[in-house]
Amino acid sequence: MSDDGIGTVGAATAAVSAVDVWKVYGSGEAQVTALAGITTRFEKGRFTAIMGPSGSGKSTLMHCLAGLDTVSRGMIHIGETPLTGMNDTQLTKLRRSKIGFIFQQFNLLPTLTAEENMLLPLSIAGRKADPAWFETIVTTVGLKDRLHHRPTQLSGGQQQRVACARALLARPDVIFADEPTGNLDSRAGADVLAFLRNSVHDHGQTIIMVTHDPVAASYADHVVFLADGRMVDELSAPTADAVLDKLKHLDLPENQPDTEPVR
Ligand SMILES: Nc1ncnc2c1ncn2[C@@H]1O[C@H](COP(=O)(O)OP(=O)(O)OP(=O)(O)O)[C@@H](O)[C@H]1O
């Protein structure tokens, strides 16, 4: 297998892959090219951060990779499954069975307890939690004595740890995290990031995280940088300083490539 075989052999082994992905919003004068030919692969068992200036296409890329939005052109695979061409029902089924989500706003249901929130995606999918795995996750996330609390009775950090546990319980092929520490103070954020980091290290979880924060990105194994809808750089074994340095250079207008309209 070679790295340039993303569209063929590589797609079978990466957790997620994108080949020449374009996303264009609107038309005519109002046309915005949010993604301009992204080709990349996200390895299994790796924690990848997606970074870039505001408007560079991070959220759009994440939404397309997770099947929450359709691409204008190009191909996305989750494992060996091609997303492109799937209808809404197929996408919903795929998201339920293969993908976990962690959002900036936690997205917990206020009327359910922490435990019920954690188990909700599994019950919607008609699956039962493996008791040993539930125990492992709840213990690791440090919420054993909070299982019967409702979200309003939990701190922001605890709520986000419930959301992390919820994502991990279904053992998804990949977890997409959108600014998971955006609403947390630095201590609670560090707890959540350490937990995500450990789930990759200890359980081989694949995580793809969008973040603005170089410190959050430094918990990842790998960082990809977007500018104007293109992947313009990447960094392995990132430190916060190295990430910051890369970002500073991306922000310079002369370093931003021209975008091409989709034809
Ligand atoms: N629904 C939409 N309709 C039109 N344009 C959109 C839409 N969503 C995003 N865009 C545009 O696409 C580009 C990429 O947006 P996106 O939200 O992906 O960037 P981002 O890197 O996540 O930004 P931020 O860091 O500010 O959240 C931006 O120019 C944005 O204005």
Image (cartoon, rainbow, N blue to C red):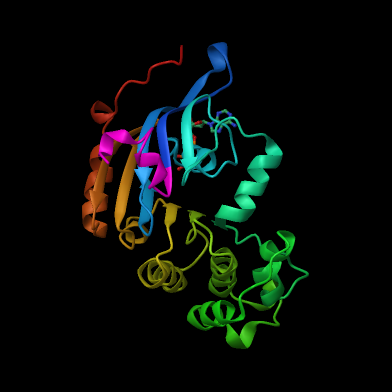
Vertical position of residue 48 compared to residue 71: above or below? below
The spot of residue 14 in percent (x, y) is 38, 47
Residue under the point 45% across and 16% down: 262
Left or right for 186, reference 147: left
Question: Is residue 240 located in the magenta-colored stretch of the structure?
Answer: no
The spot of residue 235 in percent (x, y) is 24, 49
Of 203 and 141, nearer the camera is: 203
Q: Quadrant of residue 55?
A: top left
Residue under the point 56% across and 57% down: 100
Vertical position of residue 223 compared to residue 191: above or below? above
Check the image and name the residue furthest to the bottom.
145
- Please tell me how many numbered marks the rendered image carries: 0
Q: Quadrant of residue 44?
A: bottom left
Of 255 and 170, nearer the camera is: 170
Q: Is residue 35 visible?
A: yes
Of 120 and 189, nearer the camera is: 120
Question: What is the quadrant of the N terminus in the image?
Answer: top left
Of 131 and 39, nearer the camera is: 131
Vertical position of residue 45 compared to residue 29: above or below? below
Vertical position of residue 133 compared to residue 72: above or below? below
The spot of residue 52 in percent (x, y) is 36, 42
Bounds of the magenta span? 1-16
Residue under the point 78% across and 69% down: 111
Left or right for 42, reference 154: left
Left or right for 63, reference 2: right
The spot of residue 245 in percent (x, y) is 22, 48
Q: Is residue 52 visible?
A: no
Question: Is residue 3 located in the magenta-colored stretch of the structure?
Answer: yes
